[in-house]
């Protein structure tokens, strides 16, 4: 049976070692004590979202906090190849579904994209509000799937700004139903960053595709079927995780 896992802020586990004392409070502490009803003597895991995971014994449980003593600490190294999902905004929460499932599949960063055909629009105060919501979705999905790292959420980008961002990646791929190159024929780099672009339900228009390919992105297709925006990214990322060897490694953290 897997141990309950809770996240703390980055840096909390810096310098932690066996016998170190930790306090789990805030929302995570309240959830652990009041919802999960963790009690003294139980063993839990605490992760900082950047690779450090500590196994801890509960020494005291309050109404909204746990007092912990560390029994062991592991720092899981970052993967050699980092995968990022560029997800176009989509209606009906399908973009949020993509973020959640992609996180469970192991994505390392998520970048929201205001595509020309996106029905959903983030404007004004909605930008910060929805970026915060996507970050919370990724955090909860990382905890549920027992990941040692929480995906980085980058700011919302327009197509022009996205093209500039894609130019910095070691490999940029755009899922497109008319692409002639299948994803299975793409050679991944041994190290570096791979960004995968997924359009909205209405697809990526030719002018936008031209802007992205002009920045060095390569159009690819998954297969003969046309997938929804909520499933295309996670399925492609699952394949990439498998062929990159990430899923072949021993389970850790």
Image (cartoon, grey):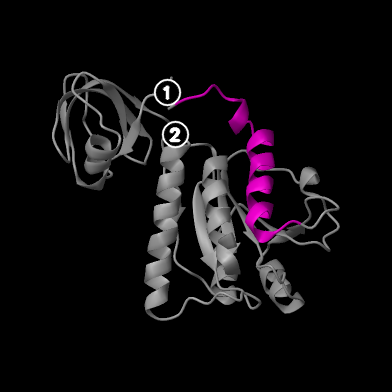
**Residue interval drawn in magenta:** 227-252
Q: Position of residue 250 (x, y in %)?
A: 54, 21
Whether residue 218 appears in magenta in the rendering, the answer is no
Q: Are marks 1 and 2 in contact (CB under 8 Å)?
A: yes
Whether residue 236 appears in magenta in the rendering, the answer is yes
Which of the two labelled residues, at mark 1 and mark 2, occupies the earlier sequence position?
Answer: 1
Where is the N terminus found, in terms of image quarters? Answer: top left
Residue 89 lies in quadrant: bottom right
**Residue that carries the numbered disc 2 in the rendered image:** 146
Q: Residue at x 84, y 63 (%)?
A: 178
Q: Residue furthest bottom?
A: 124
Q: Is residue 58 visible?
A: yes
Q: Is residue 76 above or below residue 109?
A: above
Residue 20, numbered label: none
**Residue that carries the numbered disc 1 in the rendered image:** 2
Residue 86 lies in quadrant: bottom right
Secondary structure beneath disc 2?
A: loop
**Residue 244 appears left or right of 70:** right
Q: Residue at x 15, y 38 (%)?
A: 63
Secondary structure beneath disc 1?
A: loop
Q: CA distance from mark 1 to mark 2?
A: 9 Å
Q: Residue at x 73, y 73 (%)?
A: 210
Q: Position of residue 71 (x, y in %)?
A: 24, 18
Q: Residue at x 82, y 60 (%)?
A: 179
Q: Nearer the viewer, residue 186 or 88?
A: 88
Q: Is residue 216 above or below residue 206?
A: above
Say which of marks 1 and 2 sits in front.
1
**Residue 213 appears left or right of 50:** right
């Amino acid at each position: 049976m897997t141990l309950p896992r809770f996240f703390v802020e980055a840096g909390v586990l810096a310098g932690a070692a066996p016998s170190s004392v930790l306090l789990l409070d805030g929302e995570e502490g309240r959830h652990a004590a009041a919802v999960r009803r963790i009690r003294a003597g139980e063993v839990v895991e605490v992760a900082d979202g950047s690779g450090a995971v500590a196994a801890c014994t509960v020494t005291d449980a309050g109404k909204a906090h746990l007092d912990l003593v560390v029994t062991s600490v592991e720092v899981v190294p970052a993967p050699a190849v980092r995968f990022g999902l560029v997800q176009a905004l989509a209606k009906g929460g399908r973009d949020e579904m993509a973020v959640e499932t992609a996180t469970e599949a192991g994505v390392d960063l998520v970048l929201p994209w205001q595509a020309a055909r996106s029905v959903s629009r983030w404007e004004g105060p909605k930008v910060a509000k929805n970026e915060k919501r996507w970050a919370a979705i990724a955090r909860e999905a990382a905890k549920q799937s027992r990941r040692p790292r929480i995906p980085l959420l980058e700011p919302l980008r327009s197509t022009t700004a996205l093209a500039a961002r894609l130019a910095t990646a070691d490999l940029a791929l755009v899922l497109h139903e008319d692409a002639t190159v299948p994803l299975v024929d793409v050679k991944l780099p041994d190290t570096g960053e791979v960004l995968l672009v997924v359009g909205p339900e209405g697809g990526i228009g030719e002018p936008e595709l031209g802007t992205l390919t002009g920045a060095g992105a390569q159009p690819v297709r998954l297969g003969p079927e046309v997938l929804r925006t909520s499933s295309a990214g996670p399925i492609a990322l699952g394949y990439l995780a498998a062929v990159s060897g990430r899923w072949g490694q021993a389970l850790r953290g």
